Image (tube, rainbow, N blue to C red):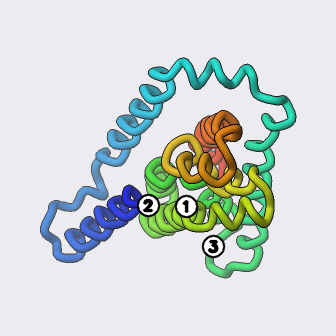
């Protein structure tokens, strides 16, 4: 939760600097592309530096391995319905925002590059909200819908920021499932976001 608030704080600071015209205009430069490359590099380091996580995936039940597919499919179905109800935005725009799955830092940069800063800002806030809702509602989700519900709600964040609350509410037995889920959903973000943005 603290990390999400820090991200929102930096976003608000950036908006304030842009409105006050304190910094030079960076919208026509390649700085977003280089920031994206740096983020992808960091994601690669985090995956490659933890071989224990990759080894633990082998012991995972094949039935539980379908959870990321259900999360991705459910999120896309929900955002498609929202896209049909919203005016001023296409279904593809809504699917691109939904395809962030809580991975606000990466998806918002992609969407800003493809569709502009307005939709990128919507993606940032929507994905931060998904993470915060998971952090706050995980105990209720686990009680009402079962131990897999907080994992699915967390999307791409279940291998990092929401993992502690998931371990506490769903139980230690679901930690490997949560990491596996987060890894696969996380991996799908750049492909799905660029797919919907290119339509």
Using the image, tell me which numbered label, if any, was put on residue 1. Answer: 2
**Disc 2 residue crowd, few under 14, some 14–19, many 20+, Cα 10 Å:** some
Q: Are marks 1 and 3 in contact (CB under 8 Å)?
A: no
**Residue at left 55%, top 61%?**
135
Please provide percent x and percent y for residue 33.
37, 42
Between residues 74 and 138, which one lies in front from this camera angle? 138
Asked if residue 61 is positioned above or below residue 33 in the image, the reply reads above
* Mark 2 vs 3, N-terminal side: 2
Using the image, tell me which numbered label, if any, was put on residue 89. Answer: 3
Using the image, tell me which numbered label, if any, was put on residue 171. Answer: none
- Number of marks in the image? 3
Left/right placement of residue 79 relative to residue 7 reads right
**Residue at left 62%, top 67%?**
137
Left/right placement of residue 55 relative to residue 83 reads left
* Quarter of the image where one finds residue 89: bottom right
Instruction: Quote the CA–CA distance across marks 1 and 3.
Output: 29 Å
Residue linked to disc 1? 135
Instruction: Quote the CA–CA distance across marks 2 and 3.
Output: 30 Å
* Mark 1 vs 3, N-terminal side: 3
* Mark 1 vs 2, N-terminal side: 2
**Residue at left 49%, top 23%?**
50
Asked if residue 15 is positioned above or below residue 50 in the image, the reply reads below
Point out the image quarter for the N terminus. Answer: bottom left
Asked if residue 145 is positioned above or below residue 68 in the image, the reply reads below
Please provide percent x and percent y for residue 190.
57, 42
Please provide percent x and percent y for residue 187.
60, 36
Q: Are marks 1 and 2 in contact (CB under 8 Å)?
A: yes
**Disc 1 residue crowd, few under 14, some 14–19, many 20+, Cα 10 Å:** many
């Amino acid at each position: 939760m603290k990390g999400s608030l820090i991200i929102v704080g930096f976003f608000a600071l950036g908006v304030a600097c842009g409105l006050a015209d304190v910094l030079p205009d960076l919208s026509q430069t390649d700085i977003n592309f280089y920031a994206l490359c740096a983020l992808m590099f960091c994601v690669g380091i985090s995956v490659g530096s933890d071989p224990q996580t990759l080894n633990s995936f082998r012991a995972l039940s094949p039935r539980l391995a379908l959870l990321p597919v259900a999360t991705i499919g459910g999120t896309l179905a929900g955002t498609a319905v929202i896209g049909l109800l919203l005016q001023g935005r296409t279904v593809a725009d809504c699917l691109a925002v939904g395809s962030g799955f809580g991975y606000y830092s990466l998806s918002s940069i992609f969407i800003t590059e493809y569709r502009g800063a307005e939709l990128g800002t919507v993606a940032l806030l929507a994905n931060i909200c998904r993470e915060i809702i998971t952090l706050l509602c995980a105990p209720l989700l686990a009680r009402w819908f079962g131990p897999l519900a907080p994992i699915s709600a967390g999307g791409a964040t279940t291998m990092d920021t929401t993992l502690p609350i998931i371990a506490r509410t769903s139980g230690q037995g679901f930690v490997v499932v949560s990491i596996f889920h987060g890894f696969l959903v996380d991996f799908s973000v750049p492909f799905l976001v660029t797919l919907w943005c290119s339509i």
